[in-house]
Amino acid sequence: MQGRIYSYLDTQLSRHGGPNFEQLPINRPRVPIHNNNRDGNAQNYIPLNTAAYTPNTLNNGSPQQANQTTGDGFFTAPGRSVTGNLVRALSSTFSDVWSQPRLFYNSLIPVEQQFLINAIRFETSHITSEVVKQNVIIQLNRVSNDIARRVASVIGVAAPSPDPTYYNNNRTAFVSIFNNPLPTIATLNVGILATTSSAGSMAQAAALAEAFAKDGTNPIVVGETLASGVKQTYSAADATGFDGVIVTSGAETLFKNGTSSTLFPANRPLQILLDAYRWGKPVGALDTASPTVFNIADIKTTPGVFSGKSSNIAGFVTAFEGGLTQFRFIDRFPVGS
């Protein structure tokens, strides 16, 4: 990992044609950053200092060289002395490459462990060599007999006996994504499914969007066309783009059996709602859309499924934001052994 740090910087420089990759929204830190990067592609800032180097005489001596007293506590290496022979050797820790993956696995909740095992099953099911399959199981078994058995059962390899040399029960906090509520829902995307054929649906979508935006989320109103108030069309929308999905009153007409349109692929509104539910995301519907769309999608009234009234938009939004904070409702995911 230490060696790859150099590769990551080189890749970013090559990919973006300059040092300003941290200005991209997806890369941008949430805290202020200050560096001497200048010019090159994708420079979006307007630097106020005329010289980005130090020392200089063109900008009243700024920027100053950072150290332990200047530059907000920048680390200055102390003086060191080294004696002895320089040798090429590996630390004994390199003989154990299984304890840390086990620590990671132990730190996941059962649903996340199932996701991991499913991913390994998917990748290893493409292996055609019986020798390679067996070698994969040998390595997995040194991490966890549980993983090895559950993968072996799918790829046609005999379940191995435990190889406990490097087994441990260690865990670490905050590795699990689903086991902790989100500290903020700011920037999460809320898909609001509406229909441009209903003024009531569009008005309800606008009210929802206004309420969600106040708390820093990103409401995205979806409609058949880019009419006023619509941010995305159904033909361009997918559940992967939303952290939660809500169906407005009137939009249930897009879900009914036999409904077809040239404005989006068949059953796209239903697909968005159903995929969001299957992926554990909060889903909701208002007024006449509930329970109609839930019945069509065969979505049960379980945690993370919200019904509301247009007469109480504020209460519905508050409840739905609680679902966004939980992030995923894991009771929807099957767990095996």
Image (cartoon, rainbow, N blue to C red):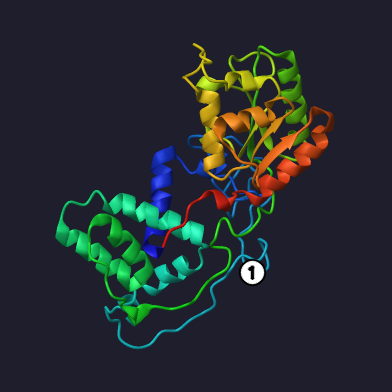
Location of residue 202 (image quadrant): top right
Quadrant that contains the C terminus: bottom left
Location of residue 12 (image quadrant): top left
Q: Identify the residue at image location x=42%, y=44%.
A: 13
Q: Identify the residue at image location x=67%, y=31%.
A: 291
Q: Identify the residue at image location x=68%, y=49%.
A: 325
Q: Residue 138: image x %, image y %?
A: 25, 69
Q: Residue 314: image x %, image y %?
A: 82, 36
Q: Residue 302: image x %, image y %?
A: 64, 46
Q: Residue 74: image x %, image y %?
A: 61, 65
| Position of 102 relative to 185 (above/below) | below
Residue 9, can we see it?
A: yes
| Position of 84 relative to 33 (above/below) | below
Q: Identify the residue at image location x=39%, y=63%.
A: 1
User: In the image, 113: left or right of 58?
Assistant: left
User: In the image, 10: left or right of 221?
Assistant: left
Location of residue 95 (image quadrant): bottom left
| Position of 318 relative to 267 (above/below) | below
User: In the image, 209: left or right of 66?
Assistant: right
For the residue carrying disc 1, how many other residues have a C-alpha within 10 Å: few (<14), some (14-19), or many (20+)?
few
SS of the residue under disc 1: loop
* Residue type at tag 1: Gln
Which residue was labeled with disc 1? 68
Foreground residue among 291 and 52: 291
Foreground residue among 138 and 174: 138
Q: Residue furthest right?
A: 311
